[in-house]
Amino acid sequence: MSNIAKAFERGKAFIPFLTCGDPDLETTEKLVKAMADSGADLIELGIPFSDPTAEGPVIQAANVRALQGGVTTDKIFDMVRTLRKTVTVPMVFMTYANVVFSYGAEKFISACGELGIDGLILPDIPYEERDEFVSICKRHGLDLISMIAPTSADRIAMIAKEATGFLYIVSSLGVTGVRSEIQTDVGALVALALENSGCPCAVGFGISTPEQAKQMAALSGGAIVGSAIVKLVARHGRDAAPYVAEYVKSMADAVHSA
């Protein structure tokens, strides 16, 4: 069983997201430990990029802060190496193709495998261009996570058939960010994905309250939350860990009770 599959062992997974290096990597390290201790089943680590096209203003601003603070891919790798000595929760990187290409795809993905990173999310890679990444990921024991947006049924079936790890269901068209309500028929999206895949599904984009998280987890295999956590980090900076721990616990409890 892959590490990512283990994240869904209790039925529903809570998946928090952080931008690495915002406000600094020491704080990121503390936050990852706090989230793991507070019930996170899988942790998404964002590697900052100067033009994060899938992100709303909250995560874009975090990317800018991290890059201005001097974070680099190698420094993030070093941080993960340290974290893996104590943190056993599955972890995946979310970043953009340019980050991987500029590092060298083989070199980047092989380093991820050595570090104990379990998967990779590249939101700007279209399905038609993922093959070159899939083969490298397979070689180094990573799952390349596919994203499914509210698009045509034919396309959803095609993406789901090839999925590994878990399927990231995008609850809303547009960029990441907190939303007061989610209007997409998530249940129908998940049902169509599961008809064509053996992978669990988790829903992201727009989830910020325990009620929303529970509602989305009831329709799928879990909930992914980014902007609401990144907002807490922006507000509390280096002192964010206890606030994030409390928030993650409330969200994880809601998801696990769905």
Image: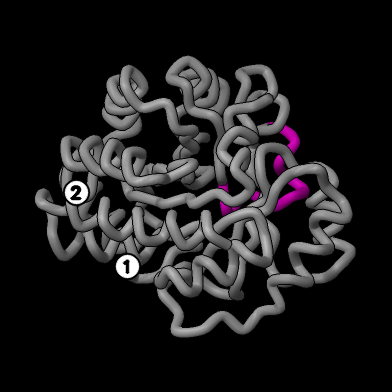
Q: Is residue 124 magenta?
A: yes
Is disc 1 surrounded by few (<14), some (14 to 19) or many (20+) residues within 10 Å?
A: some
Q: Quadrant of residue 20?
A: top left
In the rendered image, residue 145, in percent from the top left (x then y), is placed at: 63, 43
Question: Which of the 4 image quadrants contains residue 58?
Answer: bottom left
* Kind of residue at badge 2: Ala
Q: Nearer the viewer, residue 122 or 180?
A: 180
Quadrant of the snapshot with the C terminus = bottom right
Q: Quadrant of the N terminus?
A: top right
Q: Secondary structure at mark 1?
A: helix
Q: Position of residue 105 (x, y in %)?
A: 55, 28
| Camera-nearest residue between 251 and 176 | 251
Label 2: few (<14), some (14–19) or many (≥20) C-alpha neighbours in 10 Å: many
Q: CA distance from mark 1 to mark 2?
A: 18 Å
The residue positioned 49% from the left and 37% from the top of the image is 92
Is residue 192 one of those drawn in magenta? no
- Would you place residue 225 above or below residue 209 in this image? above
Q: Which residue is mark 1?
A: 58
What residue is pinned by disc 2? 241
Mark before the other along the chain sequence, 1 or 2: 1
Residue 162 rendering spot, x and y as whole percentages: 81, 42
Is residue 154 toward the left or the right of residue 242 in the image? Answer: right
Mark 1 or 2, which is nearer the eye? 2
Badge 2 element: helix
Q: Are marks 1 and 2 in contact (CB under 8 Å)?
A: no
Q: Is residue 201 above or below residue 204?
A: above
Residue 153 x, y percent position in the rendering? 86, 68
Q: How many marks?
A: 2
Residue type at mark 1: give it.
Val
User: How is the model colour-coded?
Assistant: one colour
Q: Which residues are drawn in magenta?
A: 122-132
Residue at image point 34% right, 54% down: 249
